[in-house]
């Protein structure tokens, strides 16, 4: 499994779950409003809230998790205040997961070996296709 697959299977759902919960519980948004902003169905948001999707409870024990959650709270506030859009905050949070070491922890937990260095993973060359 490559790091990008870990992001798709585990990191993005975790980000959606935490942002949805924060927007609903702390910013009093409805599930339908969160679904609209995320470009998902209301049923999908319900599954995130009930931890049927995006649950990675082992990661919540990580020393990097509180840092991640601090950024989730900031992102949710910016989304709720309409300062930015969901997509921009997901990219920001994904980068935080990568740079904080949380991606390496998730990768090792699910793959069973340390995260290998991916030359362009997370660099502007790899993201923008200028490699």
Image: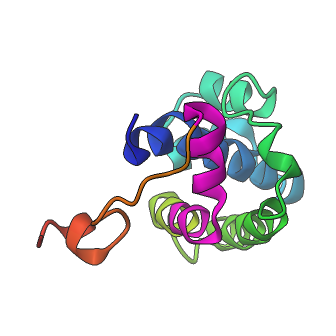
Q: Is residue 103 magenta?
A: yes
User: Does the image show residue 34?
Assistant: no
Residue at the (87%, 58%) spot, across then down: 26
Magenta residues, start to end:
94-112
Left or right: 21 in relation to 108: right
- Nearest the eye: 22 or 58: 58
Residue lying furthest front: 113
User: Does the image show residue 67?
Assistant: yes
Q: Is the magenta stretch mostly helix, strand or loop?
A: helix
Left or right: 2 in relation to 46: left
Residue 128 position within the rendered picture, expressed as x and y whole percent measured from the top left: 20, 69
Picture quarter with the C terminus = bottom left
Residue 66 position within the rendered picture, expressed as x and y whole percent measured from the top left: 84, 65
Q: How is the image coloured?
A: rainbow
Residue at the (57%, 44%) spot, across then down: 107
Task: State which quadrant residue 100 falls in.
Answer: bottom right
Residue 48 position within the rendered picture, expressed as x and y whole percent measured from the top left: 71, 32
């Amino acid at each position: 499994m490559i790091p990008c697959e870990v992001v798709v299977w585990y990191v993005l759902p975790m980000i959606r779950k935490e942002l949805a919960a924060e927007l609903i519980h702390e910013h009093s948004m409805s599930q339908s409003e969160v679904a609209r902003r995320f470009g998902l169905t209301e049923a999908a948001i319900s599954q995130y809230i009930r931890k049927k999707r995006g649950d990675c409870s082992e990661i919540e024990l990580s020393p990097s998790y509180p840092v991640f959650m601090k950024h989730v709270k900031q992102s949710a506030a910016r989304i709720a205040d309409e300062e930015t859009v969901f997509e921009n905050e997901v990219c920001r949070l994904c980068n935080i997961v990568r740079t904080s070491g949380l991606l390496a922890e998730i990768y090792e937990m699910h793959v069973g070996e340390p995260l290998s260095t991916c030359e362009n993973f997370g660099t502007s060359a790899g993201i923008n296709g200028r490699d």
